[in-house]
Every structure is written in C-alpha cells, then in structure tokens.
Image (cartoon, rainbow, N blue to C red):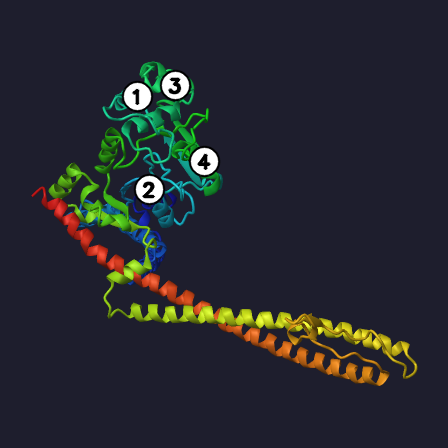
C-alpha cells in the first residue's frame, strides 16, 4: 500500500486528495474573479499609484493562468492562450522614455524641470544669469538606500575629444573680426571671447596674453594635471537630500559668475567644459551640432522658450534645426514635440490691456482698481490728518497736566485767601506797531490768578478742558482705527484685483500665443515638403 501511494503521488500530484483539490481550485477561481472585477473598475482610474498596483495584480493573474495551463501547452488552443498572456506581460514591462528639453540660453529650462520634479534646486538655477553649462540627463533613482536617494554619474570626455575641442577653440580665437576684448565680462558673445572663457575656466594659470597669442599646445594642455586625471573617467556622487546633492554637483555642471567690469582671477579649475556640451543656440556652432545629435535619441521633445520671445523670435520654428525637422516629417512624429512657454508671469499689465478687446470684463476691473487706488490715497491723507490732530491734542493734554499740577501744589501750600502768584502763564507777542499784545495764535492765553478762589475756579476749568480733550482724543483714535480698517480692506481689494487682472492678462496672452506657435511650427515643417 505504501509503494502504491508513493507511485500515485509522484505521477499525479494534482489529484491528491480529490475533494481538497476541487475546493482549492474553487477558492483560487474566486480570488481570480475578484481580481478581474477590480481590474475592470480601473478603466477610468487616473491615480498612478492605483494603476501601478492594478498592473501588478494583472501580472499576478496572467502568471496564475500560465501556471494553470503549464501542463497543457501541447494543445493548440491552450498554447495560443499562453502566448497571449506572454504578450500582455511583455507590454506591462517598463518602457524607457527619453524626453529632451531644449531651449536657448537662459530660457528657463532648469527652473521648469525643477517645477515638474517638485524640487527647489535639483538642477542649478540663477536669477541673474544662465548657469547650466552641460547636457544633463535626469532619471528616476530606484535605490532604497536613503543615504543615496540622489545619485549622479559625471562622465568626462576622452582625451582625444578634449584635444579636438581645444583645436576648435584655437580656431575660434583666430576668427576674423573677433577678439577677446571683453572676455571675463558679463554678456560677452564673440566666439573668440567664448573660446577664451572656456580655456581659461579649465586652465586658470594661462594668462590672457598667452591665450590671445595662441601660445599653448592642445596636446600639452591635455596632459596637464589635474585635467589628465579626469579625462575619460566617471565620477559618482550620492547624497541623502537634494540640497546636499546640489552642493556636491554644482561645480561640475554650473559655470561660475562673472561680474561686469571685473576680471575672473580665480585660480580654481572649473570642470564643466570637460563634461558635456551646452544646449542649442549656443555661441559655439560645433557644440550645438553635438547637442542636436542628442535630440535624435529622444522619444519626446520639450522646446522651452520665454513667452516674451517665443512668438516674435519664432523659436518653435527655428530652434530645432533643419535636419531634425526633416526627420520629424519623415517619421510623422509631430506629436512628440511640445512647446513650453516659461516666464509667463513676466508681463506688463498696461501693455497687455491695450491689446485686449475693450468689451473684455478685465477693463471694468481695471477701472474699479483705479477708483480704489484713489480711495486709498484719500484714506491715507485722512489718517495723516487724524494722527496729526491726535498728536496736537496729546500736547495740549500734557500742558494742561502741568498747569493743573502747579495749581494743585499752590493751593496745597496756601491756607488762607492770600494771593497766589506764578500759577499762570501769559503768552505775549509783538505786534507790527512794536507793542506787546496778547496773541491767541502764538499759544493758549491764560489769565493771571490772584486769589485762591480764582485758582479753584481755574483748576476746575482746566480739569474740564482736559477731560474734553481726552474725550476728543478717544474719538479720534476710534476714527483712526476705522480709517485704517477701511484702508486695509481697500488695499486687500486692490491686491485681489491686481492679481486677477494680471492672471487674466497672462491667460489672454497664453491663448493668443498657442495658435501662433502651432502655425509657426507647421510653417517650419512645410519648408521640407
């Protein structure tokens, strides 16, 4: 009995025991049906996390189906099902998508990438200048090591490529009509100046005179340390945070600041010229050609340009170059190109309003804002007057306090009805006739008090006057508070209108630019029909 059981178990393991196997199949079938139902519900799902989870559920289901038919692939129909499952699994594998981001210098490519990745400074940016000096490839880091959450591989060019580049830069230095005057200054664009900047960045020990007279050998320069040590190598940088990562990476992809009118006397070598070439529309045509070859490896392309220039400069039509546009036409891959307008908030509201139709509601908002600004100025003046009156009354109250104090002291020191002297102040001024006279405009005139009875009456009068001034001051303070509340409310309404008006102007310009950019791009492609 024992050997028979062993033989039976070995040859037909799926059928022992029969009842349990049937229940197990029913349970697995129910589980698969529930998974299939959940997949059906995901047709309208947009959450990336949910879709990825559903993809894994689908792969589990396909693996279960293939496992169930593993012993029956000799049947033609079953083999067909298994092949379909294999095809579906192949489609679910992650596909490599390369998106090229191109644009003129300072177009805002780095800022746009940081915004898309929700990183403040993953790619270096600078509000004063263009600073990304190399082609940078960015991809998802799948490591689970938190200390290496950000990782970079910096590929330096080979020695032969650097020697060829130095020869090309020597040629640029000899361009007729170009010189290196103005090199090391902000905004230098002559090719000779650009070539000088690049050579001096890597070899700061070379003098301007040596470079200008071509007193160097490209082969000898390529053998100098530390240049020789980095050519053809790969440097790996890792960091736990983006800020720490950028601190380590910046010197390899960021060109340094140059201050207008000041020479670059730094003796520190810069690495960016040894990494990769700059982007399109750069001053160096050879480097732009290398950048153009990178575009042919992209499955998608983002053309980035400031919206203030993209229409007038026909960036979408001119930036890509003739060879790439011809390739787009041959392949029919027009949908792979996306034009992205940056710096859309850089707009003159007054200029934009002149271009917008008069019936647009934004003009009414603009007039409302103008009225509110007038009200703002009026409220400011009223607040100033009230504050000045409060200040004057405070001075009067202080004077009355002093006089009341003097009278109270005088009264306390007198026990009878004797005269009280020096308790009042008579303000005099000189008239045009040269005679002294009382002058109400010069100050508050007060009568001289000669008796205790008069002093008591005067004290009561001063106290009443002080009370009235305090009441007026309290009312003025309430009025000032109310005016400031009105002022704050008015300014809040002005800010809200300003924001709405600017937003409307931006949206109007965006709507205007979109069809124009499409038309210009289409016209650029028609040139090759």
Foreground label between 4 and 3 = 3
Tell me which numbered mark, 4 or 3, is placed earlier along the sequence: 3
**Label 3 belongs to which residue?**
228
**Label 4 belongs to which residue?**
238
Displayed quadrant of residue 233:
top left
Label 1 sits on a secondary structure element that is helix
Q: Residue at x 26, y 37 (%)?
A: 280
**Label 1 belongs to which residue?**
166
Label 3 sits on a secondary structure element that is helix
**Label 2 belongs to which residue?**
106
Tell me if label 2 and label 4 are in contact, CB under 8 Å: no
Displayed quadrant of residue 419:
bottom right
Which dot marks residue 269?
none
Q: CA distance from mark 2 to mark 1?
A: 25 Å
**x and y percent of residue 399 in the render?**
72, 72
Q: Residues within 10 Å of mark 1 (few under 14, many from 20)?
A: many
């Amino acid at each position: 009995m024992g050997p028979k059981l062993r033989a039976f178990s070995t040859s037909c393991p799926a059928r022992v025991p029969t009842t349990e196997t049937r229940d197990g199949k029913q349970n697995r079938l129910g589980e698969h049906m529930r998974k299939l139902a959940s997949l059906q519900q995901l047709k309208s799902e947009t959450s990336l996390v949910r879709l990825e989870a559903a993809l894994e559920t689908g792969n589990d289901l396909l693996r279960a189906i293939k496992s169930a038919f593993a012993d029956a692939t000799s049947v033609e129909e079953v083999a067909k099902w298994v092949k379909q499952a294999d095809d579906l699994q192949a489609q679910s594998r992650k596909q490599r998508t390369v998106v090229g981001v191109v644009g003129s210098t300072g177009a805002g490519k780095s800022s746009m990438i940081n915004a898309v990745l929700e990183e403040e400074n993953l790619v270096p940016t600078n509000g004063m200048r263009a600073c990304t000096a190399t082609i940078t490839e960015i991809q998802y880091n799948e490591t689970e090591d938190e200390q290496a959450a950000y990782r970079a591989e910096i590929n330096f060019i080979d020695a032969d490529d650097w020697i060829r580049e130095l020869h090309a830069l020597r040629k640029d230095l000899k361009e007729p009509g170009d010189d290196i005057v103005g090199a090391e200054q902000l905004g230098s664009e002559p090719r000779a100046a650009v070539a000088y900047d690049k050579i001096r960045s890597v070899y700061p020990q070379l003098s301007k005179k040596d470079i200008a007279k071509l007193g160097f050998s490209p082969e000898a320069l390529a053998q100098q340390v530390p240049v020789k040590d980095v050519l053809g190598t790969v440097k790996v940088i890792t960091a736990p945070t983006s800020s720490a990562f950028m601190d380590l990476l910046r010197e390899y992809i960021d060109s340094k600041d140059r201050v207008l009118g000041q020479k670059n006397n730094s003796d520190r070598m810069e690495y960016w010229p040894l990494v990769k070439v700059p982007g399109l529309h750069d001053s160096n045509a050879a480097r732009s050609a290398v950048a153009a070859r990178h575009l042919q490896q992209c499955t998608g392309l983002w053309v980035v340009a400031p919206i203030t220039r993209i229409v007038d400069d026909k960036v979408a039509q001119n930036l890509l170059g003739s060879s790439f546009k011809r390739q787009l036409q041959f392949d029919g891959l027009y949908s792979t190109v996306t034009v992205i307008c940056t710096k859309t908030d850089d707009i003159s509201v007054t200029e934009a309003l002149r271009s917008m139709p008069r019936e647009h509601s934004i003009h009414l908002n603009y007039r409302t804002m103008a009225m509110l600004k007038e009200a703002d100025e009026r409220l400011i003046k009223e607040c100033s007057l009230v504050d000045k009156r409060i200040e004057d009354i405070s001075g009067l109250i202080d004077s009355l306090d002093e006089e009341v104090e003097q009278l109270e002291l005088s009264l306390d020191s007198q026990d009878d009805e004797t005269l009280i002297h020096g308790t009042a102040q008579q303000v005099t001024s000189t008239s045009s006739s040269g005679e002294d006279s009382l002058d109400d405009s010069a100050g508050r005139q007060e009568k001289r008090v000669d008796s205790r009875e008069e002093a008591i009456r005067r004290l009561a009068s001063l106290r009443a006057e002080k009370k009235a001034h305090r009441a007026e001051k309290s009312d003025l303070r309430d009025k000032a508070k109310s005016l400031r509340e009105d002022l704050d409310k008015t300014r809040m309404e002005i800010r809200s209108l300003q924001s709405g008006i600017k937003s409307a102007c931006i949206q109007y310009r965006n709507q205007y630019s979109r069809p124009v950019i499409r038309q210009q791009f289409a016209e650029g492609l028609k040139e090759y029909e």
